[in-house]
């Protein structure tokens, strides 16, 4: 997800503090060599690296034992908070089968967990500043694990699940997200992409394993003890992992809002593209188990499809990160969104047997993961290092609506056209809704791409 945001936030805060003390704005100042005059800079397009960033980057070790221990700790935490979020569809299908509530209502519970990442971004930045990365990670893991344990006592109450899974786990998830986004960048410069790729790929792999674990536990001990077991495992492994995390320097939080950015065409369109793109993100993993049940497949097959989706997402995050260096981040983001839209509009509606459905899961998972790994790089490439933290912070905050309402809207459409126990045609409105949102987002990114350069083969 926006894994490079927090390092750039630290960078901007440091410059802001220095500038306030000196009474001037140095945020776009370029280094002067041999007494030469500084180059003229267009603030809206500059990608020159500020002098403070050069000094800061030169002191980063770019690896080492301590650095990779921090990456290990972050990876374990990401394994749990990303993996459980993307595996919610397995539990949702089990609760729907037990007639707790409709798929639309229960998908709202799973969406609320992810929504907290955007909703609490500003608050969490200040919590990290006050407590430090390690203590914030410990608090986040504790809330995540305790929320899962308490969810085990709420499987007969939708309201209870909203509070335990949605709010308590959501707060833990948002804290963990901020910590793993901030800390790795303090230990890597040239290998920063690799480090962040390892951390977030762990989330996709975690979702792969957790999907199978959830299905096996539900069939053996039922949903209540499934929640509790996952919660105890999260606490048992996540707390030691959180203790391994420490920052090299105090983490500071900048101002995340700069309203004048909305006056720029590129920012406004990318903001809208990100807001649209998040609506369909959780539709496939939340509804694949129900869809597979409608095909007459077992719950274990549904869990396997979610696991395959998560594994493909991990592959997509790594591959799209490499493609950003090869063909440019904006081109890569456009392709990943086209992949997501095409798979939902073309492949999913005709997936009436297991074979085509597996193909859809793989293709959509790659496109889904590519969005998260590519968007931060796009913002940095388009707006330059001097403004990227503010721009990215605002764009991530704009994802809250899609996180919260994307999957529930699909659930409401499914209910309106017959529900999960009806024919496969009942799923089509929800599928086309999700695919259309992804297609709209890809069109907006394409507009920005053509606005910057009309050559189709230009690396952007």
Image (cartoon, helix red, strand yellow):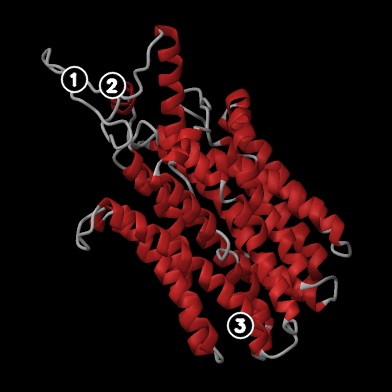
Image-quadrant location for residue 33: top left
Could you tell me if residue 157 is visible in this image?
yes
* Neighbours of disc 3 within 10 Å: few (<14), some (14-19), many (20+): many
In the rendered image, the residue lying farthest to the right is 156
SS of the residue at dot 2?
loop
Is 43 drawn above or below residue 391 in the view shown? above
SS of the residue at dot 3?
helix
Residue sitting at x 60%, y 62%? 86
In the rendered image, the residue lying farthest to the front is 263
Residue sitting at x 42%, y 45%? 267
The residue where tag 3 is placed is 428
Q: Position of residue 434 (x, y in %)?
A: 56, 70
The residue where tag 1 is placed is 38
Q: Of callouts 3 and 1, which one flags the residue occurring earlier in the amino acid sequence? A: 1
The residue where tag 2 is placed is 29
Give the Cα distance between marks 3 and 1. Answer: 58 Å
Viewer-closest of 28 and 8? 28
Residue sitting at x 19%, y 62%? 457
Residue sitting at x 52%, y 82%? 348
Q: Is residue 457 left or right of residue 314?
A: left
SS of the residue at dot 1?
loop
Q: Of callouts 2 and 3, which one flags the residue occurring earlier in the amino acid sequence? A: 2
Q: Of callouts 1 and 2, which one flags the residue occurring earlier in the amino acid sequence? A: 2
* Neighbours of disc 2 within 10 Å: few (<14), some (14-19), many (20+): some
Is 208 drawn above or below residue 82 in the view shown? below
Give the Cα distance between marks 2 and 3. Answer: 53 Å
Instruction: Check if mark 2's residue and mark 3's residue have beta carbons within 8 Å.
Output: no
Q: Position of residue 215 (x, y in %)?
A: 69, 73
Image-quadrant location for residue 275: bottom right
Give the Cα distance between marks 1 and 2. Answer: 8 Å
Instruction: Check if mark 1's residue and mark 2's residue have beta carbons within 8 Å.
Output: yes
């Amino acid at each position: 997800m926006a894994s490079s945001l927090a390092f750039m936030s630290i960078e901007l805060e440091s410059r802001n503090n220095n500038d306030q003390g000196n009474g001037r704005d140095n945020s776009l100042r370029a280094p002067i060599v041999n007494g030469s005059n500084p180059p003229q800079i267009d603030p809206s397009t500059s990608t020159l690296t500020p002098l403070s960033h050069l000094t800061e980057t030169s002191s980063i070790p770019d690896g080492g034992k301590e650095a990779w221990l921090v990456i290990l700790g972050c990876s374990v935490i990401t394994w749990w908070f990303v993996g459980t979020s993307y595996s919610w569809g397995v539990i949702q299908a089990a609760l729907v089968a037990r007639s707790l509530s409709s798929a639309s209502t229960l998908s709202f519970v799973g969406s609320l967990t992810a929504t907290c990442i955007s909703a609490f971004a500003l608050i969490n930045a200040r919590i990290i500043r006050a407590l430090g990365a390690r203590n914030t990670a410990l608090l986040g893991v504790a809330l995540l694990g305790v929320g899962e344990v308490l969810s085990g006592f709420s499987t007969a109450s939708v309201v209870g699940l909203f509070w335990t899974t949605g709010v308590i786990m959501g707060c833990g998830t948002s804290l963990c997200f901020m910590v793993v986004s901030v800390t790795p960048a303090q230990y890597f410069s040239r290998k920063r992409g690799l480090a962040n790729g390892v951390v977030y790929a762990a989330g996709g792999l975690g979702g792969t394993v957790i999907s199978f674990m959830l299905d096996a536990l539900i069939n053996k001990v039922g949903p209540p003890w499934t929640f509790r077991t996952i919660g105890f495992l999260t606490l048992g492994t996540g707390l030691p992992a959180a203790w391994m995390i420490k920052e090299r320097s105090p983490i500071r939080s900048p101002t995340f809002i700069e309203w004048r950015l909305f006056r720029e065409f590129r920012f406004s369109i990318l903001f809208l593209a990100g807001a649209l793109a998040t609506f369909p993100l959780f539709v496939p993993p939340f509804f694949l188990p129900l869809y597979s049940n409608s095909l007459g497949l077992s719950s274990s097959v549904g869990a396997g499809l979610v696991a395959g989706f998560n594994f493909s997402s991990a592959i997509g995050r790594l591959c799209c990160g490499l493609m950003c260096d090869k063909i440019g981040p904006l081109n890569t983001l456009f392709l990943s969104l086209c992949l997501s839209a095409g798979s939902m509009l073309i492949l999913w509606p005709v997936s009436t047997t297991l074979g085509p459905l597996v193909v859809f899961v793989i293709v959509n998972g790659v496109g889904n993961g590519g969005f998260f790994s590519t968007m931060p790089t796009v913002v940095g490439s388009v707006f330059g290092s001097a403004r990227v933290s503010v721009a990215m912070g605002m764009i991530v905050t704009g994802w809250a609506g899609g996180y919260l309402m994307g999957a529930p809207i699909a659930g409401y459409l499914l209910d309106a056209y017959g529900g999960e126990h009806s024919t496969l045609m009942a799923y089509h409105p929800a599928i086309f809704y999700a695919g259309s949102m992804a297609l709209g987002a890809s069109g907006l990114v394409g507009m920005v791409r053509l606005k910057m350069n009309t050559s189709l083969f230009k690396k952007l």
